[in-house]
Amino acid sequence: MTIKIESLDNSKIKSLVKLRESSRERKEQGLFLIEGHREISLAQKGGMEIANLIYSPEYIKKELAIDEEKIIEVSKKVFAKISYRENPDGFLAIAKSQEKKLEDIKLSETPLLVVLEAVEKPGNLGAILRTADAAGLDAVIINDLKTDIYNPNVIRASQGTIFTVSVILSSTDETIKFFNEKGIKILATTPDTEKDYTEVDYKEGCAVIMGAEDKGLSVKWLKAAKEKVKITMRGKIDSLNVSVSAAVILFEAVRQRNK
């Protein structure tokens, strides 16, 4: 039987607002929010466990298959309170968090991965996940996490691809060890090199290491790298946004592999 909620003061609604706004709340409850028909559909395909589906019939334009026992119907004003979108489509899911480890990665014959070290902005992380999906990466590995991967802005910026890409949380030492054991070439991105990213062979298994825009990569990664690469700048600035840089380099790898 579908539960119906019309009051803004309902305890369930207050709890959802906390999940939307608080990283600590998401961590303590082991839950997070997914808004949008497409994003929820991708989460289902990616094997995420949906605890509840909240919907407002005044918004929805298409159906979403889910167990009736998990459905909560809310009024338009209640949905507007819990939504974090300007133009909601009437669907919001409560999902259970998952944490994957390096051993969970299913490597292809010639792996292509990206490592993000200390990336802070949710929008950048989400955009890189979207690129990772489009490029068909084996995994996105995050070292020294500075933002909650289930931040609503990460999910929104990723267009739901956070659920279609293997996202791994790992330490730098563990990641370097994993790459060395698997024979994966480490390519560090840094402006302090003469080698342009187009001068590298990406056709063998490799991992592209990206650092935070303000600090760049740690000494550990720079020492572990087999090659260091940069995107040559032709204007006045010395770097691109990290999500743009990731897209440029990863699709060079795709181009070489397709060729």
Image (cartoon, rainbow, N blue to C red):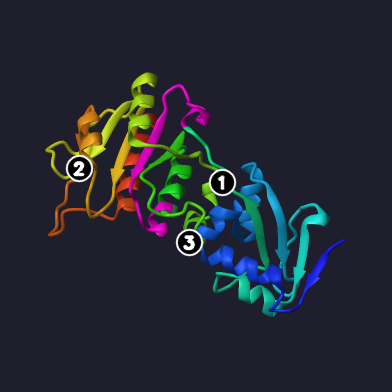
Quadrant the N terminus occupies: bottom right
Give neighbour class at mark 2: few <14, some 14-19, many 20+ (Cα, 10 Å).
Answer: some
Residue 190, which numbered label? 2
Q: Residues within 10 Å of mark 1 (few under 14, many from 20)?
A: many
**Cα–Cα gap, marks 1 and 2:** 29 Å
Q: Nearer the viewer, residue 208 or 1?
A: 1
Magenta part of the chain = 102-125
Residue at the spot of label 1: 163
**Direction right: furthest residue:** 1
Q: Is residue 120 magenta?
A: yes
Which residue in the protein does label 3 denote? 153
- Label 1 element class: helix
- x, y (%) of residue 222? 21, 35
The earlier-in-sequence mark between 1 and 3 is: 3
Locate residue 94 relative to residue 247 in the image: left or right: right
Q: Amino acid at mark 1?
A: Phe
27 up-or-down from 114: above or below: below
The quarter of the displayed image where residue 46 is located? top right
Residue 13, percent from left and from top: 67, 70
- Residue at horizontal 60 percent and vertical 59 percent from the top: 33
Q: Residues within 10 Å of mark 3 (few under 14, many from 20)?
A: many
